[in-house]
Image (cartoon, rainbow, N blue to C red):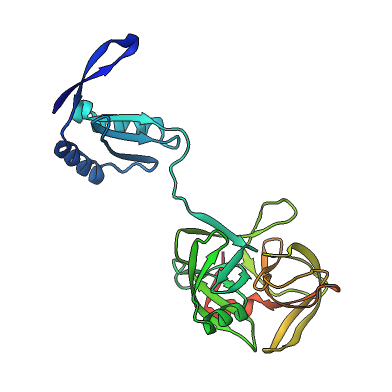
Amino acid sequence: MLGALLIGPGGQAQAATRYDSAHLVSIQQTLNSTLNTPGTNWGIDAQAGRIEVHADQTVSEADYQALSRAIARYGNAVHLQRDPGKLQTAATVINGGDFITSGGWGCTYGFSVEKKTDPSVKGFLTAGHCTVDATNDGASAWYNSSGNYLGDTTGGFFPGNDFGLVNSRGSVSYVGNVNDGITGGVQDITYSRDAKIGEYVCSFGAYSHYGCGTVVQNAWTADYPAGKVFGLDEVDGICRTEGDSGGPLYDDTAALGLLSGTASTDNCFSFYQPVNEALSWYGMEVY
């Protein structure tokens, strides 16, 4: 260890001890294997010549005192202090209705899903023509509006049906919510079912944002230039546009469908792929 002078209160010089780097590295390696308190972080402060251990506001007083006792053996070589705020990863949360892109294609995030037989396998649904078109252009990776990597296409069905699956990867937090235009917050999605004729439903698109309307038809067919899609739900009153494809259709906590297309932005008729068909195809469920 090395001696140094620090200027204390009143301008008086105070002796302080600085520890050589090999000694500090040894201590840090021990702390790395022995400290297990979420909300803490530590490392060598080269300027102070010691190890700093920081505990955020989520660390209980009992755990803080336990930390203090654990490092007491190292004397002044380790310094413990409280930090304001909360230690967390810089992950981005994504919700149904958010913008997603792959290659040159921009679409909308539908619903977060997980495998029925293994909930650790997660992903999200969007329109099949989005995943198919991106794949045909040689793109598989999907990103959000901030450029955060979301995952890669693992499936796509279009035409005939119109749904696609992307696996969950990267540092983004996948939660079972969709954007809610009423509160400006989110709506939790807990289960899925088929939409009913006469039902008042809502949707969120990356470009058109929030809208609600009434289901007027089930089992509808749309003959797009790229091919026919069967079994769609037709909704009156929700105006959609390009880039909204894959957006969620829901009623309260129930997932209902994924936006396939629109007949007219003036008349506000839009068509949705029933979500249960997509979930059944991939063996997934919403959460």
Residue at horizontal 62%, vertical 66%? 191
How many numbered circles are shown? 0
The image shows residue 146 at horizontal and vertical percentages of 55, 58
Q: Is residue 135 above or below residue 107?
A: below
Q: Is residue 51 above or below residue 212?
A: above
The image shows residue 62 at horizontal and vertical percentages of 37, 31
Residue at horizontal 23%, vertical 31%? 49
The answer to whether residue 73 shows anywhere in this view is: no
Q: Quadrant of the N terminus?
A: top left
Q: 108 or 190: which is nearer to us?
A: 108
Q: Is residue 135 above or below residue 149?
A: below
| Outermost residue to the right | 267
Residue at horizontal 65%, vertical 64%? 97
Q: 182 or 105: which is nearer to us?
A: 105
Q: Quadrant of the C terminus?
A: bottom right
The answer to whether residue 14 shows anywhere in this view is: yes
Q: 28 or 196: which is nearer to us?
A: 28
User: Is 9 placed left or right of 123 in the picture?
Assistant: left
Residue 265 found in image quarter:
bottom right
Residue at horizontal 49%, vertical 59%? 172
The image shows residue 81 at horizontal and vertical percentages of 35, 29
The image shows residue 216 at horizontal and vertical percentages of 83, 76
